[in-house]
Image (tube, rainbow, N blue to C red):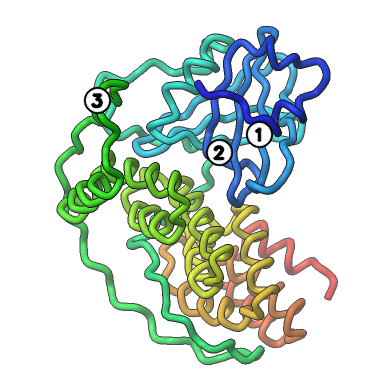
Amino acid sequence: MTIMPYELIQQLPHEIDPAAVVAHVYVGHAPGGGFGETHLLSHGGRLHVFGRGSMLGKFEPVNLVAGASPRLERGSFNSTLHVPTADGETRIVLSMFEVDQATSLVGEIHPEAIPPEPADPYASHAPDLREAPSAPRMQHPPKPPPPKSKPARQAQARPQPPSAPPVRQPQPSPAPPQHKSGQGHAPDPKAEIARYEKLLEQRPDDVVASLSLEEIYRDQGDYQNLARILLARVEHLDSSLEQVEALQEVADIYAVTGEPQNALECLQTAYLLDYTNPKTVQQLEQLVDEHNLWNKLLTGLNAEVQHLDEIAARAGILVQMSRWYRKIYSRPDYADACLMHAKRLDPQHPEVLAALNEPH
């Protein structure tokens, strides 16, 4: 448990007395995206959720559905708390270091929200696919490209497809994390970083080393290394939804640190994993508009979409590309070519049928 920050206490609604808050948990996650945080409060026998999309922004309450219970979805690296709200479901990502506190708090109010602990707490858990749309698995995490000059705003020839990635060999299961003790001297951050980095170098899927480095780099505000750790973790995550959310966060970091090309690389990979994710689409359009990267985005998608195994995903992405060509470039010939290609791939695809009936 942590002490509520003063700015949150100032913004609590009048019906919540800070002194009467039974319990409080801080989670380093922003429901609105970007660098932010979430605070879970237990007050009056109810769960209250407050989040802000930026460390500089204001806290806003997440309006919960009366009587609805949250649901915890356990994962290997992260767990996800699904909170029903009046505006739809809010997903709060909990790291291994946060999940125990949050589940304890939520479980006191909504016991049915917490699934039983598995026999092996460090075994992989099958993801809950009820919310996760079908998407192709990413074969390898994106490698940030070197900075390039701003591309001309016109269509380019498709680049050659990348070489096939090496097959990742199975790795032994990671050791469980050591519980922190209040006794003894505080560990030296530099020594801890060196130790965990060496462990990750020897075993890239080491859960404990990856999460420990993430916690250290977040506390230090070292966003370059935080992005590197999250990016290296992507291929070891259990589901495409976890991969997409990790890539979205890395893209946010790159956007804030002035690396739009790297942010685009991450978002393009996330989009190919799940083109229906609304946050990815929003981030993509905002980024390419701000930095004039439409040409780079469409050129990259034009090459990569040809290699997707799932026909429905290829058709859906081509439909969106046709809309972008028509809206951004006013090129109906390119737009129609994409749409006809999508129709040949999957003539009964609902997005293809909808696009064919749209007025132009």
Query: Of the residues under marks 1 and 3, which one precedes in the sequence?
Result: 1
Q: Amino acid at mark 2?
A: Glu
| Badge number at residue 135 | none
Q: Amino acid at mark 3?
A: Gly
Find the distance from the CA under tag 3 to the CA under tag 2. 45 Å
Query: Of the residues under marks 1 and 2, which one precedes in the sequence?
Result: 1
* Numbered-mark total: 3
Of tags 3 and 2, which is closer to the observer? 3
Query: Of the residues under marks 3 and 2, which one precedes in the sequence?
Result: 2
| Badge number at residue 89 | 1
Residue beneath the point at 17% across and 49% down: 170
Do callouts 1 and 2 mark residues in contact (Cβ within 8 Å)?
yes
Residue beneath the point at 43% across and 66% down: 308
Find the distance from the CA under tag 1 to the CA under tag 2. 10 Å
Q: Position of residue 352 (x, y in %)?
A: 66, 64
Q: Position of residue 348 (x, y in %)?
A: 62, 60
Tell me where residue 166 sits by quadrant.
bottom left
46 lies left or right of 75: right
314 lies left or right of 59: left
- Say which element carries label 1: strand
Question: Which residue is at the front of the view, 185 or 147?
Answer: 185
Q: Position of residue 154 (x, y in %)?
A: 64, 91
Say which residue label 2 marks: 131
- Say which element carries label 3: loop
| Badge number at residue 184 | 3
Q: Position of residue 325 (x, y in %)?
A: 69, 80
Within 10 Å of disc 2 (Cα), the crowding (few <14, some 14-19, many 20+) is: few
Find the distance from the CA under tag 1 to the CA under tag 3. 43 Å
Residue beneath the point at 52% across and 64% down: 254
Q: Is residue 200 above or below residue 77?
A: below
